[in-house]
Amino acid sequence: MSSHRTGAFISFADSSTITGPPAAFQKAPRIPDPPSQYELDDITNGPSILPTTSGTQTPKTPDDLEMSRPPSPIADEVDALQTLNNPPMNKWRLLSCCCMCFANGLNDSAPGALIPYIEKDYSIGYAIVSLIFVTNAIGFISAAPLTQILQAHLGRAKLLVLAEATMMAGYTMLVLPSRPFPVVVLAFLLLGLGIALNLACNQVFVANLANSTTTLGWFHGAYGIGGTIGPLIATALVSHGAPWSSFYFLSLAIAFLNLVLAHFTFRTYEIDNPPSASLARTVSGSDVDSKSRLLKQSLKNKTTILGALFIFAYQGAEVSISGWVISFLISYRHSSPSKVGYVTAGRSYSPALTSPPKIPLMSPGRAPHPQSDYPSLNEKH
C-alpha cells in the first residue's frame, strides 16, 4: 500500500536511457614567440621568456632577472656641499677670502678720515672730492656683467689674481709722487672694480660651504675688523705729519700678499669643484654659453633684482655716510681732523664684534645633512 502511494509521486526510469553531458571546450595554451636574436628587440620588448611546465613565465637567467625589474625613477640630483676639511685646501681658501675681505674693509673706511687732507692737498671742495666715491661706485657696477664672463675664461684663481692686481694698480697710482687729482679719481675706479671682482667670487665660495652661516660670519667679520682699524691707522699717520697717501703703502703690501695667497689656494679650485652632472645634462653648449645663459636667467629673477637694488642702496649709503661724517664734524662741529678720524672706526666696530659666530667652525662627530641642515636646497622657487 505504501509502495503504491510512493510510486504515484516518483517514477523510475531505466539507467540505460541517461546520456552523457557534451564535452567541454578546452583552450590550448598560447606559446609565446621565440626570443629575438637582436639586442634592440630585447631592450624594446623586455627580456625573452620561455614557458614552464607550471604555466608561469620566469626569466631565463639571473641577468634577465635583474633586467626584468622596472627602471628606477630619475630624481633631481643635489650636489654634496664641501666642508672646511673636504677638500683640505678649503681651510686655506677661507683664510684667503677673509684676508681679501679684511683688505676691502680697510680700503672702504680709510677715505673718510683722509678726505680733509685730500681737500687741503689739492685745494678743492666737497663737490670735487666726492668724485672718488662716484668713480668707486662705477667700478663696482662695471664688475657686475664682467664677473661671470671673466671667470668662465680665466677660472677662479686667475680671476682673483686679476682682481688683486687691479687693486695694486690703483694703490700704485695713489702713492705716486706729485700725482694730479684726476689720477686719484681713476685710482678709485680701479679699486672699486678690483674689490667687486674678489668680493663676488669669495662670497659665492664661502656661501656654498657647509655650515655657511658660520663661515659667512667669519668672512664678514674680517671686513668689520678691517673697517675698524682702517681709520685708526690713517688718522694716526696723518696726525704725525705723514702725507695722506702713505696709508696706501700698507694697502699695496696687503694686496700683494693677497694676490700670492689667492693664487696658491685657488689654483686647483676647478679640479676640486667639477661641474655637476645635473648641470652637464641640462645645459648644452660651451661653458661660456651656459654661464651666460644662467646670467640672463638671474637678471629675470625678481628676488635677484630686489636684492641687488637693496645692496646697492644700503652699501652705497653706508660707505658714503661713513666718509662724509668726518667733513660734517669738522665744518659744523668745529672738531679737529686729527681726532674726528676715529669716529669712522665706530661704524665698523659692531660688524666686527657681532659677525664672527660664537660656535666652532666644525661640530665634532656630526656631518651636515643637506636636507636637514639646509632646507633651502629642497625649496622650489
Image (spheres, rainbow, N blue to C red):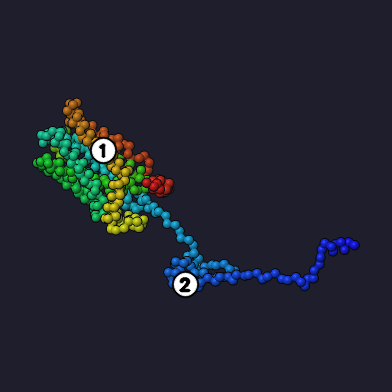
* Residue 226 in view in this figure: no
Residue 127 horizontal side relative to residue 301, left or right: left
Question: Against 325, is 138 above or below?
Answer: below
Q: Which amino acid does label 1 sit on?
A: Ala
Q: What element carries label 2?
A: loop
Q: Which amino acid does label 2 sit on?
A: Ser
* Crowding near the residue tagged with mark 1, few <14, some 14–19, many ≥20 C-alpha atoms within 10 Å: few
Q: Quadrant of the N terminus?
A: bottom right
Name the residue located 52 percent from the left edge and 68 percent from the top edge.
59
Name the residue located 17 percent from the left edge and 45 percent from the top edge.
170
- Percent of width and height locating residue 25: 63, 70
Residue 20, quarter of the rendered image = bottom right
* Residue at image mark 2: 36
Residue 281 horizontal side relative to residue 129, left or right: right
- Percent of width and height locating residue 67: 47, 65
* Residue 190 in view in this figure: yes
- Percent of width and height locating residue 154: 24, 54
Name the residue located 35 percent from the left edge and 43 percent from the top edge.
213
* Crowding near the residue tagged with mark 2, few <14, some 14–19, many ≥20 C-alpha atoms within 10 Å: few
Q: Residue 313 carries which label?
A: 1
Name the residue located 15 percent from the left edge and 34 percent from the top edge.
127
Residue 40, quarter of the rendered image = bottom left
Q: Which residue lies furthest to the front in this view?
A: 8
Q: Are marks 1 and 2 in contact (CB under 8 Å)?
A: no
Residue 202 horizontal side relative to residue 188, left or right: right
Q: Which mark's residue is nearer the viewer, 1 or 2?
A: 2
- Percent of width and height locating residue 54: 59, 69
